[in-house]
Amino acid sequence: MLRVNIIGIGPGNPELLTGQARQAIADSNILIGDKRMLAAFGAGKCLFDTIKTSEIAAVCQDADAEKDTVAVLVSGDVGFFSLAKTIAGKLPDCDCHRYCGISSLVYFAQQLEMSWDDAKIVSMHGRKQNLIAAIAQNNKVFSLTGGEHSPNALCRQLCKHGLETVDVYVGENLSYPEEKITHGTAEEISKLEFPSLSVMMILNKNANGFEHTVHGLHDDLFMRSKVPMTKQEVRAVSISKLMPKATDNIYDIGAGTGSCSIELALQAQAGHVWAFERNPVAVELLGKNKELFNVDNLDIVAGEASEQIQEMPAPDCVFIGGSGGNLCKMLDIIYAKNPECRIVVNAITVETLIEVVEYYKTRTEYDLEIVNVFAARGKKLGAYNLMMAQNPVYVMTALKKGE
């Protein structure tokens, strides 16, 4: 069986290579990695300039297990946002061994003479994560950057969300002779230029410490108007039925004030939420609530949801609070994108209840659960407390059988 050494080379300077990693490279006659890595470590080896999984697999497949040993060079540490995770399990018939390296976080913290065990870790390199919320809620945040998410572009976003005074350290070309570390406020950093592939350490002494530990936030936390809103009690039940995961892509259809959209975005901080709303007044209010909660992983989509969802990424779960009369059409589109999608529909009318029940009679691969939620809130009337009934709501949950 072909031996494959997956080696974390650290920030890039050969002097920072671990002893084990150096020996693993010496024992390998075939090296795979990008040009900069190969230039530093590839003397006397057979070199392949690629970081594509399919091409790495092809090189391994063509190698002679009796004569060859392959080393795949990856930047940083093999366990920290690494290519090692991408290729894991995708090299059949290979005996893979990992060798740790110094991550960019560890090296950068060393250069700043700063501890990192209390830092919130975020990657904006090829990912959509909620950096704004992380910085608003944590005193110290480390972030990888990349692509359109350059340090200056990210700092412009911080300024838009009232975080222009936070302290920002930017590291570029770490461990190389041209290494540079820049310090300033987010506003100052937003006006400078940096390589896209950099790292940031952001310090916010005024972090609010907000932790989203429960779903069903108090209604008064949201900006309100005459726009319909899913109230706290019903929202808590609906979200628990939807079972959102941290990495989910989520639709909120008929978002109204955005109370469900906001809560779902807080739950899925490593995922993404699309809030669909056709009422212009509600769309404006959604924007205000998005800004209020700093949920950068929430996109507001104006217009008819039945049309807008056609081009959207496949959802993992969908909350439907209002369908505009196109419920069955939307369900068909959603299931065409992802037959495993978890769906919760809220309804206050018997007609919508019947429509959902009839739809799932034809979709026997799904289990439909119906819960009727009644809630009443106390209201002071002189020396007495009077219970004021809220509209009863049907919370209907559809899950693929076996889930």
Image (tube, rainbow, N blue to C red):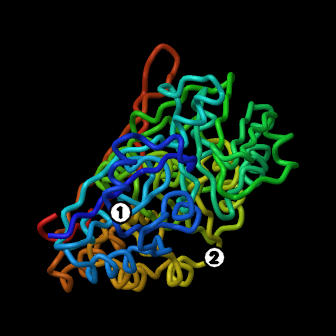
Q: Residue 117: where, in percent of width, then height?
A: 47, 26
Q: Can residue 224 be seen in this view?
A: no
Q: State the residue position of label 1.
A: 71
Q: Nearer the viewer, residue 268 or 224?
A: 268
On screen, 219 above or below 51? Answer: above
Amino acid at pointer 1 = Ala
Quadrant of image for the C terminus: bottom left
Q: Residue 90: where, in percent of width, then height?
A: 27, 71
Kindly identify the residue that appears in the image at 26 percent across and 81 percent down: 61
Q: Quadrant of residue 87?
A: bottom left
Q: Nearer the viewer, residue 229 or 333?
A: 333
Q: In which quarter of the image is residue 28?
A: bottom left
Could you tell me which secondary element the residue under label 1 belongs to? strand
C-alpha gap between disc 2 and disc 1: 52 Å
Q: Nearer the viewer, residue 246 or 288?
A: 246
Left/right of residue 38 with respect to residue 357 in the rendered view: right
Q: State the residue position of label 2.
A: 303
Quadrant of image for the N terminus: bottom left
Kindly identify the residue that appears in the image at 37 percent across and 64 percent down: 86
Dot 1, crowdedness within 10 Å: few (<14), some or many (≥20)?
many
Q: Residue 400: where, in percent of width, then height?
A: 19, 71
